[in-house]
Image (cartoon, rainbow, N blue to C red):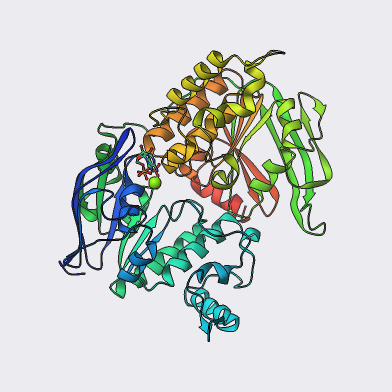
Amino acid sequence: MNDEIILDIKNVTKRFPGITALKDVSFQVKRGEIHGLCGENGAGKSTLMKILAGVYPYGSYEGSVIYEGKELKLEDRSIRQAIEEGIAIVYQELTLVPQMTVGENIYLGKEPTDNGVINWNKLYSDTKNILDQYHLNVEPQALVSHLGVGKMQMVEIAKALSENAKVLILDEPTSALNEAEIEKLMEILDSLKAHGVTCIYITHKLEEFARITDSVTVLRDGKAVTTLTTKDTSVEELVRYMVGREMKERFPKGARQPGEVIFEVKNLHAVDPGENNRKVLNGVNLNLRKGEILGIAGLMGSGRTELVTTIFGEYGKITEGSIKLEGQEIITKSAREAMNLGISLVPEDRKGLGLVLIQSILNNISLPNLPQFSNAISIDKNAELKACLQQAKDLAIKATNLENPVESLSGGNQQKVVIAKWLMSVPKVLIMDDPTRGVDVGAKYEIYKLMNELAEQGVSIIMISSELEEVLGMSDRVMVMCEGRSNGTLDAAEATQEKIMAYATGIA
Ligand SMILES: Nc1ncnc2c1ncn2[C@@H]1O[C@H](COP(=O)(O)OP(=O)(O)OP(=O)(O)O)[C@@H](O)[C@H]1O
Ligand SMILES: [Mg+2]
């Protein structure tokens, strides 16, 4: 890295109807560095990146972007032009076409041809080369819809890498990756850096800034508040700039008193409903007390999501074992049945499952909860609005109006809408699959506070989390899964990261 400026962002302002997403933003990115960008949900990070990537063309914003000494002037509807200039982006939202193969997705719009006919052999061998070059374990001909979220994210990254860009923008690339995949991505970024590629890196996992970036710019409320050299800063300092105040603790203290066991899973075995010979659960035991928060830890692929979606009646075919709610054995064949029994699930893949993007925030929150606001003849619109406003306030959803479509919200705020929707029903058992993924530090704290309050009201919570700190910070007990089984349960008082990892990897 030298001190040459590759990107000089000067006084950029971007307005949307009713909101100014970027306010006079200026900072510089050096050639060959990994430049972090952080800020709370809605701070303007993705908007700024979309300007660099040509989603919002020249003329749709004020100010200027000087790229390699020249003003960047991307034409309307020409994302291709940004790529030709050498700027590639991995978007925060998944953008792959699920019905197409990995290769078709990577070469979409730039398929290799012979005399105007797509050369499929070349397309797939080129795909294989890229995947191999970065040691990505994905089949070129696999249908994207058959991949897990983590693999899809790796394909998105491979697609951007295939552009041989000078500037690579990664907007929350690790939110769907497991630890091994994150490690792989870090290696890829190191090697790109060694080749002089410049990277802009966005994440809510603040530890990643120290791990990979050279400098970090903080956005707050649409303004660039500072640019720091990574080695001279700390997570605490970043948080202070992001939220504009000191945050003393990351986990609020609860005052709950868990009661008797109300939910029990005994020796549960299940197979994949599509592939009956593929075992996904291999003997899970757990019990959950009234008003308790039970953390579920485990490596990616250990069966955590399979367990909760099976309990919720959405996935696995149970071959052995039982599930009991309040002493009664229950069989849930659909999410609707589970909800009627008082079980809710905040799903993992909120990008795919959770929301109807073109519908209003209000509708998305209230739709599954309409029975609460309805009598035989009509819906009490006032009560509905009031309840939704309360949820939006509790979760600090950053929206100018609940009638706006969900797609106008920033990524993290979309996530909060899904959580709001499931919290509103006040279930007996609330299952949350990685509830704070992609959510900023301040909002995480709000979600934790809500979880504590719900538990104090007697709601029993199962929380899956990949962040060990979060599991330790929030749970009364931690159940650890390994290869489809429950491999051990620890009291919060005796749990440590080391003990959890020992159970998760099967050493203990
Ligand atoms: N297409 C749009 N129409 C209207 N408002 C928008 C649009 N896109 C973004 N916004 C608003 O601009 C602001 C900045 O959003 P942006 O997506 O850039 O935030 P972000 O920093 O990427 O947040 P996150 O961490 O949640 O991804 C938000 O208030 C958002 O609601
Ligand atoms: Mg964003």
Q: Relative to residue 288, is residue 352 depicted above or below?
A: below
- From the viewer's perspective, tell me whether residue 385 is left or right of residue 271: left
Frontmost residue, 101 versus 460: 101
How far across and how far down the image is residue 402, in percent?
Answer: 46, 27
* Numbered marks: total: 0
How far across and how far down the image is residue 236, in percent?
Answer: 28, 41
Residue depicted at x 33% and y 32% = 18
How far across and how far down the image is residue 206, in percent?
Answer: 35, 47
Residue depicted at x 47% and y 73% = 110
Which image quadrant is residue 128 in?
A: bottom right
Residue depicted at x 76% and y 23% = 326
How far across and how far down the image is residue 318, in percent?
Answer: 81, 45
- From the viewer's perspective, tell me whether residue 137 is left or right of residue 320: left
Which image quadrant is residue 170 in?
A: bottom left
- Whether residue 271 is visible here, answered yes or no, is yes
Locate the N terminus by quadrant: bottom left
Frontmost residue, 213 versus 415: 415
Frontmost residue, 318 versus 285: 318
Q: Residue furthest bottom?
A: 115
Q: Relative to residue 464, is residue 52 depicted above or below?
A: below
